[in-house]
Structures are given as structure tokens and as C-alpha cells.
Image: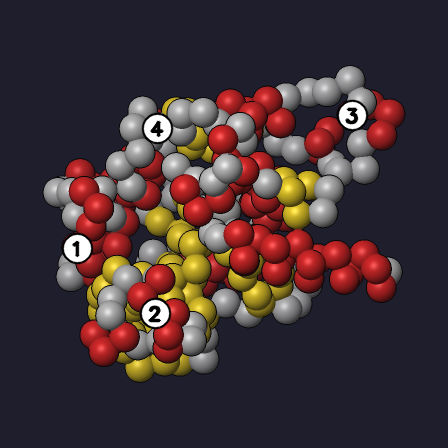
Amino acid sequence: MGKRFYPLTRAQPKEMLPILDKPVIHYVVEEAVNSGLDEILIIVGAGKDSIINYFDRHTLDETMDDYGFRDLPDIYFVRQKEQRGLADAIKYAQKFTGSEDFVVLLGDTIYRSNDEKTVTSHVVEEFSRTGSPIIAVEKVPREKVVDYGIVDAAARHNNMFKIMGVVEKPEINQAPSDLGITGIYAFHPEIYDYISRLSPGRNSELQLSDAVNLMANERDVFGYIINGRRYDIGTKEMWYRTFIEFSKDVMTA
């Protein structure tokens, strides 16, 4: 709903807030494309037509496109009829993905990798190697665990570990670890079956963490600690900090 960005979000969704000269959603699409994902579906809610309009062809693209619009794959859109949580939003992709495996990226999160490959590329590689669902995580400060889905992690091997379960935004003394979900998921189509078994949970929404818990009880689900940095544009403060940090790159270039 954009409550934390009000009144900025009266006329534009938070996914369209600028980081330098591009909106956040542009960085998300770039992450997908640079990771080799060539079929993209964006789930949009009410009042977010500007996201759809942004990826339309524009007359200026032919003469001043330094942003790669002409090189983007076809992007498709479907509307989430009401905002009932992340798991509900993913459900809208079922006809698009069909029997294929797929990756979920959140529309308000930007990643910068520590090497030449994207963060999402590493997740996809682990997904292919293990044949199991992969969820990207990062270490979070103890006082921040209340803002994340926190995973119950088995023994680590390098950056990988088995996920025993997920606790959504736990109190500090109830958090099973300091590993928070960042917002990249690689799934098999079976995730739709687990979502279909959900009842509304926290905030009367269909929580993806609940679907992951069901899945982890029946098969292996792995966590991957990202090799990079995540920028969550979830509050005005985090948006401002991200804008400033990206600005430093331009000033030193």
C-alpha cells in the first residue's frame, strides 16, 4: 500500500521511486535479465499502472537509449486483484510459468554482487546443482530480526545450508538464527501446491513463509547466503541511504 512512503506514494508506487535516474523496478528487471532470465512476469496491484507504462516502447528509445530498453525481453503483466500477501501474488504466476521452474524477485529490492555474476545467477546455479528450492538469505543485525522472515538453519557448508523452517518476523528472543530472507527464491512448480494449502496467516495474508514451512517438512529446501549486498527500498530512510550510496559511485566515476 506504500504507507511508509506516504505521501510520495499517493501518485506513484514505491517500485517507481528513483534511485539516481532509474526507478527501483528497472534495477530489478536488470537483475533478472543479467541473470539469464528471458521471460519476465510482473505482478502489479491496483494503482500501479505506471509500472506497466514505464516498460512500454517510447519514441526516445531510438535516439537516446543508454538504458537497454531495446534489449529487454518481452515483459508481461498480471494484476493481483487484492493485496493478500506474497504467496497470493506468486499464485497469479501459475499460468505463466506452467510446468517450468522459476525465480521470484521482489519489486522493491536491489542487489549488488561481489563478483562478476549477479546474486540471482548464483542462486540459480545452486538450484540447478541441488535440484532443490533455494532461498537467498543474509545475516541481519540482532535488532532487525523482527523485520524479516528468519530461517531455522541446519549445519552450514560454505554459503549453503538446509532450511528446517521459517519464522516470520519473530521477536528477538524467539528468532531461530540471524539469517533473514532477502527476497530471491528459486522454485519448482510444486510451490503452487503448497500455496493452495494455506490459510490466511499474519495480517490475514497468505504468507510465503508458511508455504516454505510446509515444503520443508516434505522435501529438502536450501538457503544460500548471498555473495553481495542487498538494498531494501522498504522505508524512506533505506531509500534515502541507497540513493546516496549509488550517488557516490557517479561522483567518483
Q: Amino acid at mark 4?
A: Gln
Q: Indicate the secondary structure of the residue bearing disc 2.
A: helix
> Circles 3 and 1: CB distance less than 8 Å?
no
Q: Earlier in the sequence, mark 3 or mark 4?
A: 3
Q: CA distance from mark 4 to mark 2?
A: 28 Å
Q: Indicate the secondary structure of the residue bearing disc 3.
A: helix
> Circles 4 and 1: CB distance less than 8 Å?
no
- The mark found on residue 145 in the picture is 2
Single out the mark in the foreground, 4 or 1: 4
Single out the mark in the foreground, 4 or 2: 2
Relative to 145, is 57 on the left or the right?
Answer: right
Q: Earlier in the sequence, mark 2 or mark 3?
A: 3
Relative to 151, is 62 on the left or the right?
Answer: right
Residue at image mark 3: 61
| Disc 2 residue crowd, few under 14, some 14–19, many 20+, Cα 10 Å | many
Q: Earlier in the sequence, mark 4 or mark 1?
A: 4
> Circles 4 and 2: CB distance less than 8 Å?
no
Question: In front: 43, or 1?
Answer: 1
Q: Is residue 114 visible?
A: yes
Single out the mark in the foreground, 2 or 3: 2
At 33% from the left and 47% from the top, the residue drawn is 188
Q: Earlier in the sequence, mark 3 or mark 1?
A: 3
Residue at image mark 4: 80
| Disc 1 residue crowd, few under 14, some 14–19, many 20+, Cα 10 Å | some
Q: CA distance from mark 2 to mark 1?
A: 22 Å
Q: Amino acid at mark 3?
A: Asp
- The mark found on residue 229 in the picture is none
Residue at image mark 1: 214
> x, y (%) of residue 80?
35, 28
Q: CA distance from mark 3 to mark 4?
A: 29 Å
At 43% from the left and 54% from the top, the residue drawn is 183
